[in-house]
Amino acid sequence: GAVVSQHPSRVICKSGTSVKIECRSLDFQATTMFWYRQFPKKSLMLMATSNEGSKATYEQGVEKDKFLINHASLTLSTLTVTSAHPEDSSFYICSARYVGGGDSYEQYFGPGTRLTVT
Amino acid sequence: AQSVTQLGSHVSVSEGALVLLRCNYSSSVPPYLFWYVQYPNQGLQLLLKYTSAATLVKGINDFEAEFKKSETSFHLTKPSAHMSDAAEYFCAVSDPPNTGGFKTIFGAGTRLFVKA
């Protein structure tokens, strides 16, 4: 099946620094990738939709200058949390949508990245 | 706008008992519906999906769900719970691709506990 990886799986950073999280589709091409944030014991909140070669579409209430998304290729999207603060600590999950075919509606999820800002 | 409501944030069953996790949706167009499972500190794994074909959908690990349009429901069931089924379960809805939609909206999740 389709595999999506995320790197790193865990990261601890100091307040004020920036952190980059990578999301890769390993065995398929994804024109669209999604970034979610999950608070403890809560559901997934869609942050933004990332389309290859174009600007990301952010959900209402998500600061695009704080959460920078780059979808440089059909297999890689990155999320950079700029000037991180403790309230940015969360579990970040990406997903990738398969290009074309009968399963083009299906999303494949990465294993998530635990960000802790101290 | 689409929405998903999962009834019960926690469900506890005994090993071997029936599992029933409830999900109701709201959608202006015939929806695509999904159930995902999440183990601690991991991403989501697709259990099953409804994409306007058969209303009774079978998934992995003996899970199944039935789409009931009249009740706007998509409840998840499993005849016999295993200890390994203890996890968080999310119901999700999205518009069909031919409507231009692709966003997936997730329910709040239901934590399943399985007692020995």
Image (cartoon, rainbow, N blue to C red):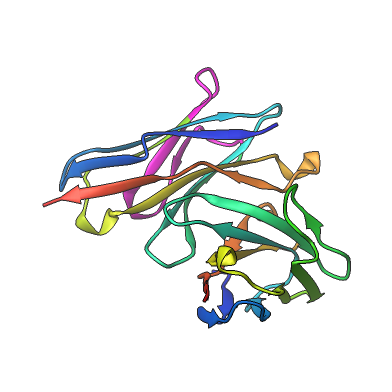
Q: What x and y, as percent, mark residue A102?
A: 68, 54
Q: As rendered, which of A88 and B62 lies closer to the eye?
A: A88
The structure residue drawn at horizontal position 58% and vertical position 37%, both measured from the top left corner, is B53
State left or right for residue A60 relative to residue A5: right
The structure residue drawn at horizontal position 23% and vertical position 38%, both measured from the top left corner, is B18
Q: Is residue B79 visible to the viewer in this orientation of the structure?
A: no
Q: Is residue B15 magenta?
A: no
The structure residue drawn at horizontal position 50% and vertical position 19%, both measured from the top left corner, is B71
Q: Residue furthest left?
A: B116
Q: Residue furthest right?
A: A54
In the image, residue B8 above or below residue B106 = above
Give the quarter of the image for residue B96: top right
Q: What x and y, as percent, mark residue B101?
A: 76, 43
In the image, residue B14 above or below residue B67 = below
Q: What x and y, as percent, mark residue A37?
A: 58, 59
Q: Is residue B67 magenta?
A: yes
Magenta range? B52-73
Q: As rendered, which of B45 and A10 lies closer to the eye?
A: A10
In the image, residue B16 above or below residue A6 = above
State left or right for residue B50 relative to residue B112: right
Give the quarter of the image for residue B6: top left
Quarter of the N terminus of chain A within the rendering:
bottom right
Q: Is residue B98 visible to the viewer in this orientation of the structure?
A: yes
State left or right for residue B101 relative to residue B92: right
The structure residue drawn at horizontal position 28% and vertical position 40%, both measured from the top left corner, is B11
Q: What x and y, as percent, mark residue A35?
A: 66, 62
Q: As rendered, which of B62 and A75 lies closer to the eye?
A: A75
Give the quarter of the image for residue A55: bottom right
